[in-house]
Each structure stands twice: as structure tokens, then as C-alpha cells.
Image: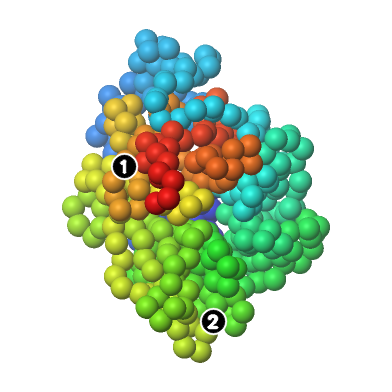
Amino acid sequence: MPELRKVMLVLMFMSISLAGCMETVTGVFKTSPKENNQKNEEMEARAPMQRERDPVDPVVKSEVGMDYDPRAWIANEYHPGALPKLISAPSYKGITQQTFSDTGGDFNVHLNSDGTRMIYNTTRYSKNPEVCIQGITAKAVQLMTEDKMVDMMAKFSPDGSEIAWCSNRYGNYDILVQDAEAKPDSRPRQLTRSTDDDIHPTWSPDGKLLAFSRFNSMDGIWQLWVMNYNTRTLSYITEGLFPEFRPVMGKTSKGTPLYTLAYQRARRRDVPWYSIWAVDVQMGGHGAVEAVGNPQEIIADDKWAAINPAWNPTGDYLAFATVRKSTLSQWQARIYEADDIYVVKIDGTDLTQITKHSAPDWDPWWAKDPGDPEGPGRIYFCSKRRGVANIWSVKPMIPGLLVKEPMGR
């Protein structure tokens, strides 16, 4: 079990190691460390040319954020000693670096409902991730958690009064919640107590539901669960990972609230890349939550993965990260780190690339822009474009969002 926890921790640090291909997830839990060592030795014995071609120290690789051939990097001016050159793309405006960590890194960003404060994980103070809060125009950092365990994937409640996150401080990963103004050493409320790991909480727009991912150790798959926050009733919904509630609610035929969850899920055949899905849920009897209709696959491809879905403020589009879509990441056979940020309309159309850089961009969050409340908002994401993971943001320029409806329609 200690070995499993170590592997789980490494995978969850960036919310991406779980995310490229289903085989990379299930393989972690179905092979022992001894078997993994034997496989690694066999692969090294069969690939002497790979070791000769790629002699860079693993620490340097981790700092740069990807595996690479040093000679090719130098030839293309991608070497770590130079500031990576941003390749222009027509789909964004005003890229901004939001955090400036030089040691460790910042990741798993989320913003409050008005887009003025962001909450994210950092390893700048400790090797284990802590939760901190920062204003979008400030550099001062408020530390929310401070212990020797892992606290990550934090989310503001819709009214900003509470924060939910996952932590392994009680043995395995559980969902915790506490007041947003609580001190770092305060004791949070434990919402889940499963012997399996629960991660990545997300609030419904009315604050009545809390969804999260649970690892089913019996089947070796991740599942979506929803908690009725008032009654603490837990309901299984479907297979999936990294759920996000749509910020706009609908109504059922009976007039009751209808909620939509976006998430990632892998197919169970061929190369099982993750794709983006959505499913509707509603309140059932006795505090339970139930699915309405069947899940829908929104964006998918047989050659690359779509991961980390995040809704735009009006619930019309989804931002997501890709894995192994760009030429550079394909050339590097990179499946353990993300590639670029894209957006897509919820009906699967208007696919638009937002970022285009040699370093990984991943884990987007789409928030309101206080400086342009009527605009398309800003997409915040994690990137290693300066060698260390930090939070960046861009204003997406998407044709479907920029077209205004005529007056009177």
C-alpha cells in the first residue's frame, strides 16, 4: 500500500499523468513495482540507441517539462537556456503570467465566481502541494493549508464562502471542506470516508451538489459520484474523471433543476485515449442524485487525448487540454504531459486552438474577466513555458463567442 500511495501522489501532482491514455491509469494499479522494474529493464535492453540519443539528466528533463533530444532543441532554438519563443496563434489575445514560482510550481487553478481571486496548488513552500489564494492583479499569496500531507484540487463554493479540496491527511484521499476565511491550521470538515481515493471536487452553481471522482479499486476505474450537500447523500453517476458542473442550470420537464457535468472518459478499445463527455443529473428521491438520459461524447480523436474540461462562464463552450496532438509532442512520444489548450462548443463544433507553445499547457479554468464583463472571459491554465510550472491566462478569441446576436432577437 505505501508503494501505491507514492505512485498515486506522483500521478496526481499535475492532474495530467492520469489523463492521457486509460492504459497509463490502469497499469499503475495492476502491476507490482517488481514487475514494473522488470519491464523497464527489458525496455532498456532493447533500446540502447534511445539512451545514447537522449543523455540528458532526468532532473533537467523535469525542470524543462518534457523529454527531448538536446541536439534537436539547439537546432530549433528550443534549448533550456533560452526563453521559449511563443508561436503566435490567432485564437487568443493578451497572454499574462499570473504566478511567478521559481522553485516547485503552481498548478490546479480555479477562480471565484466574479473572477477576482484564484485558488491553486503550490509546491514552492513544500514538496507536498499546499492550497493558496491570490488576487488576479496581485502577487501576495495567502496560504490556506499548511501541513505535511497533500492538499490539492481546491474549489471555491459559488458564493465564495467555502472551499472544497482533496487531501490524504487521513490515510487516503478524501474530500474536505472549510470556510474560505479559516486559518491554515484549522480543522476542516471531512465529507467522504471511503477506503478508495476521492479527488477533484466541483460545486453545482446553486451550491446544493458536490461532484468528485472516486477510484474503484475493485474494477480499476475512476467513477463520478455526486453528494447532496444538505443531506450528505452519495450517488454514483457514471464512469469518468475530473468532473466540472456547468455554471448554468436548466430545467427538467417537471420544472425541477437540471445540472450538467462535463468530464473525461476513455473508450474501452483500440488505443483508449481520453475524450470529453457530458451527462445531465437531477435530484431524485430521499436526497439521492440520478442521471438524466445517457452520457454524450463531445470531442474525441483516435490519435490524441482531450482532458481537463472547464466550462466558459455562460456554459456554451468547454476548454480542455490535448495530449499528443501537436507535431512536437508526437515527435517526443509525449503522453505523460499535456500539449495545448483548445475550446469547443458543447455540440462538438467550433473547435479552436487557444495556445501553441513548445512547452506543456494544461488544466484550464475559464473565468469571468472583471475588466471586460461582457466579453468571452479569460482562460487560466498551467504552463511550463519558462521551465517551471506557473499559472498563465489568455483572452480567447473564438468566432462563435464574438458574434453578437442582433437586437430584438
Identify the amino acid type marked 1.
Asp
Please report the residue visible at 42 percent of the width from the left and 20 percent of the height from the top: 87
Residue 320 visible somewhere in the drawing? no
Q: Is disc 1 surrounded by few (<14), some (14 to 19) or many (20+) residues within 10 Å?
A: some
Please report the residue visible at 39 percent of the width from the left and 26 percent of the height from the top: 90
Q: What is the image's colouring?
A: rainbow
Q: Which SS class for mark 2? A: strand
N-term mark: 2 or 1: 2
Q: Is disc 2 surrounded by few (<14), some (14 to 19) or many (20+) residues within 10 Å?
A: some
Q: Is residue 332 left or right of residue 194?
A: left
Q: CA distance from mark 2 to mark 1?
A: 38 Å
Relative to 348, is 328 above or below?
A: above
Q: Position of residue 268 (x, y in %)?
A: 23, 60
**Mark seen at residue 350:** 1
| Between 88 and 34, the one nearer to me in the picture | 88
Relative to 138, is 288 above or below?
A: below
Please report the residue visible at 32 percent of the width from the left and 41 percent of the height from the top: 351
Relative to 85, is 261 above or below?
A: below
Please report the residue visible at 40 percent of the width from the left and 39 percent of the height from the top: 403
Identify the amino acid type marked 2.
Thr
Q: Position of residue 13 (x, y in %)?
A: 54, 48
Q: Which SS class for mark 1? A: loop
Looking at the image, how many numbered discs can be counted on the residues?
2
Furthest toward the front, the residue is 408
**Mark seen at residue 233:** 2
